[in-house]
Image (spheres, rainbow, N blue to C red):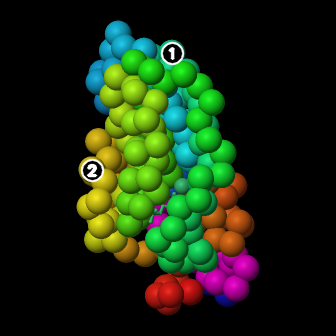
Amino acid sequence: MNGQHIQIADRQFIPFLSEKEIQEKIASLAEAIDVHYKGKELVLLAVLNGSFLFCSDLVRQMQCDASISFIRVKSYFKTQSSGRVDEVLGIHEDLKDKHVLVVEDIVDTGTTIDKLLKIIQLHQPASVEVCSLLFKKDAFLGTAEMPKFIGFSIPNLFVVGYGLDYMEKGRKLKEIYQIVDSVKGQ
Ligand code: IMP
Ligand code: MG
């Protein structure tokens, strides 16, 4: 097997974004977020499971002392968006009149953030924006607004690592890998 390839479950993956590229991008996102929310009370709302590494690196690179909260949703099936979002773990914090920044690993069709933003709005925050490390611009359906803060705009391919999983594996990887021979519908 090629040394660059990794195997996760039944599929092969090749390097897509290095640890250095990811960490440098996070530093610039942290800076932009600090500027945007200067002097405001900010709540980072990390979407589990995928954004656990991204959110922890992001918050540690930020100057602003944001509070952190979590929401868990599940919508993906193997390598293609299921188009369905089931809220698993809800919001228990008081978001009223606070500035909320939803932290996502990836926005694909946008179904997840669309549903999330609607739920968050019910809590009457002062503002809600989305920060996503990855954004699949060609898969995005446009039902929700585009994320305000985007790390990398990527083609419509399945990726794994740095929080993102393939069949619940690969989340701990420090880099991001792309699937080899991505087959639609699997
Ligand atoms: P959406 O609802 O179609 O935007 O899908 C968003 C969710 O699907 C993300 O939060 C991820 O959990 C998952 N997802 C989307 N694309 C990928 C991918 O390429 N690899 C791993 N998970 C993905
Ligand atoms: Mg996610």
Q: Which mark is residue 74?
A: none
Label 2 sits on what residue type? Glu
Magenta stretch: includes residue 42: no
Q: Nearer the viewer, residue 102 or 123?
A: 123
Quarter-of-image position of residue 129: top left
Quarter-of-image position of residue 13: bottom right
Across and down, in percent, residue 131 comes to 40, 42
Ligand 2 in which quarter: bottom right
Secondary structure, mark 1, is loop
Q: Is residue 49 above or below residue 127?
A: below
Q: Is residue 177 above or below residue 42?
A: below
Secondary structure, mark 2, is loop
Which residue is painted at 69% across and 79% down in the image? 7
Q: Nearer the viewer, residue 119 or 180?
A: 119
Please identify the dominant SS of the magenta region.
strand
Across and down, in percent, residue 75 comes to 56, 64
In this view, the residue farthest toward the front is: 122
Label 1 sits on what residue type? Asp
Q: In the figure, is residue 172 to the left or right of 163?
A: right
Q: Which mark is residue 65?
A: 1
User: Which quadrant holds the C terminus?
Assistant: bottom right
Callout count:
2
Contact flag, marks 2 and 1 (Cβ < 8 Å): no
Using the numbered discs, state the Cα–Cα distance from disc 2 to disc 1 in whole angstroms.
Answer: 26 Å
Q: Is residue 163 visible?
A: yes
Q: Is residue 46 above or below residue 30?
A: below
Point out the tag, 2 or 1, that comes first from the N-terminus: 1
Q: Is residue 161 visible?
A: no
Q: In the figure, is residue 28 to the left or right of 51?
A: left
Q: Is residue 25 above or below residue 143?
A: above
* Residue position for label 2: 145
Stretch in magenta: 6-17
